[in-house]
Amino acid sequence: MSDPLLEVRNVSKDFETGGPFWSPAKSRAVDTVSLDVQSGETLGIVGESGSGKSTLLRMILRLAEPTEGKVLFKGQDIWMLSGAELQHMRRSMQAVFQDVTSSFNPRQTVGTILSAPLEVHGIGTRRSHRAKVAETLELVGLDASLATRYPHQLSGGQRQRVAIARAIILRPALVLADEPTSALDVSLQAQILNLFKAMKQELGLTYIFVSHNLAVIRYLSNRVAVMRLGRIVELGPSEAIFDRPRHEYTKALLEAVPDITFIPARRTSGRDRGALS
């Protein structure tokens, strides 16, 4: 097996929760987590709210510094990088967040939003940016004419596709997605999940996909990490986690998923209709 694309080594994260400044009380959100991500795979991270999933993702993205441990991307400790090396890491690692609306500048058009990463990283010219924006919009299933619109003029599904387009326009090696479909209705969720799968095949992406939705994780992931109270309690192939869970918490999560059976509606008699009216 080749070297992992991403290595998380004994990472912990503490947050201050009050108390005097000389001895503040602390809460551990992530506790001694280790995992690897191989190039080309999709790692799903699942757990209930407050389990530490999003905090772990923020540390991988270098948005929150670990209290302990290391995060290595392509063999390099991301917190030791600076200058051109840090910029290269940023280009290779992109994210799609849950609340995409708040991640857009409402005064910028879609075209400006999507061309910003190209400008930041000094890729191409303004003319080539327009072509790249049009190409990427079409890649995520949107018409290139949407480049002139503003975020508030788009539907929820369109905004989510623009967020994905912004993440892939630099052709990163790793995309991290934090609950990217939880704000969408069921039909739109299915479309966006299928888009994630198609992008992986077409662009050779590697994903870390965070969700509390077990069905989403099962559909997308090759491997699954189950988190509880800041720790990974079970990690393994998706099939094994869902069909042969070993940890009691994983079993409890799976048992909590509703089993909905279709029950045909009972024919209503005239007497019943009268009683309801």
Image (cartoon, rainbow, N blue to C red):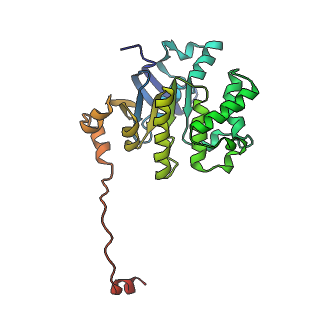
Q: Residue at x 48, y 37 (%)?
A: 196
Q: How far across and how far down the image is residue 162, in percent?
A: 61, 40
Report whether residue 12 is seen.
Answer: yes
The vertical placement of 101 against 115, above or below, is below
63 sits left or right of 225 in the view: right
Quadrant in which the N terminus is drawn = top left
Which residue is rendered at x = 42% and y = 30% of the image? Answer: 42
User: x and y percent of residue 73 in the render?
Assistant: 50, 17
Left or right: where 236 falls relative to 181: left
The C terminus lies in quadrant = bottom left
| Residue 25 visible in the displayed image | no
Q: Is residue 203 above or below residue 258?
A: above
For residue 113, above or below residue 262? above
Q: Quadrant of residue 197 in the image?
A: top left
Q: How many marks?
A: 0
Of residue 54 and residue 91, the one placed in the foreground of this image is 91
Residue 242's x, y, as percent? 29, 38
Q: Residue at x 30, y 44 (%)?
A: 254
Q: Where's residue 84, x and y in %? A: 65, 13
